[in-house]
Image (cartoon, rainbow, N blue to C red):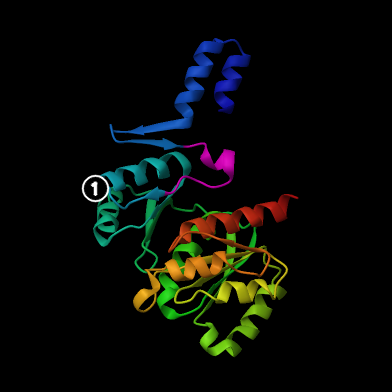
Amino acid sequence: MEEILKRFANGDLSIEEACKELKLESIRRVGAFAKIDLNRQYRTGIPEIIFAEGKKSADVAAIALAHATAKGFSLVSRATEEDAEAIKERIATEEEFMVDSNELAKTVIVKKKGYEFPKLGKIGIIAAGTADIPVAEEARVVAEVCGCEVITVYDVGIAGLHRLVKPLEDCVTADVAAIIVVAGMEGALPSLVASLVDVPVIGVPTSVGYGIGGKGIAALLSMLQSCSPGLAVVNVDNGVGAGTFAAKCVMHKKYQ
């Protein structure tokens, strides 16, 4: 963008030519099936995240490589093993890139060797049970890509509430900007945490539970009906939404 503006200032480009090049710079076409929004991170603080579900693995790999080439990294969410393998095969001939796949979180990161994600501030992530960890891990990976240092606390649900005390103290002492709380079943833990801390709490209902829980609907409704102020709620199993919202809290705290 700076190069284009310099050429315009020097009279090497007309205003029409500069506008055209700036538009091309903000969108990167990948074949006939994708248009990457390269300037999203500048506008919102959150980079484009490649949602793999429903896409061909070869297309996911092509998009991931194109974004990493332009921005230095790419993040793929909801990736299958086939998606991860396709990305690794595509990157195998590109010596400047490396691949980090997280099977539990269903994420894949492609980045140029030596590329480091920023460290803007800290957040906490609490998972009620071990069955909630995959969603918590998705939130962790996303938050780290967006510039967060993450303190994770897993398996501290309300069935054994004493397990929460020390980890929650650690989060508060670390001066986190927000705490993500991931819980299935009746989804009570986020309300409890929100009643004990002075930072935003982001509740993530998961589709974990018995019988009539509705694949997370019971947890979602419980969190939405919370009487604890300061609790925001994202959709069922939406670790990406929680991770990005927490990152926004970090950015607000850093730049306010």
Q: Read off the magenta span.
A: 38-49
Q: For mark 1, what is the residue?
A: 56
Residue 12 in sight here: no
Residues 191 and 149: in front is 191
Q: Does residue 38 appear left or right of residue 80 in this picture? A: right
Q: Amino acid at mark 1?
A: Lys
Residues 208 and 213: in front is 213
**Residue drawn where x is 52% and y is 36% of the image:** 39
For the image, the number of numbered tags is: 1
Q: Is residue 77 above or below residue 207?
A: above
- Residue 2 drawn in magenta: no
The x, y position of residue 120, in whole percent, is 64, 56
The x, y position of residue 182, in whole percent, is 50, 70
Badge 1 local density, few (<14 within 10 Å), some, or many (20+)? few
Q: Is residue 16 above or below residue 247?
A: above
- Residue 43 drawn in magenta: yes
Residues 124 and 22: in front is 124
- Location of residue 216 (image quadrant): bottom left
Residue 37 in sight here: yes
- Location of residue 210 (image quadrant): bottom left
**Residue drawn where x is 27% and y is 44% of the image:** 59
The x, y position of residue 153, in whole percent, is 55, 77
**Outermost residue toward the right?**
256
Which quadrant: the N terminus? top right
Q: Secondary structure at mark 1?
A: loop
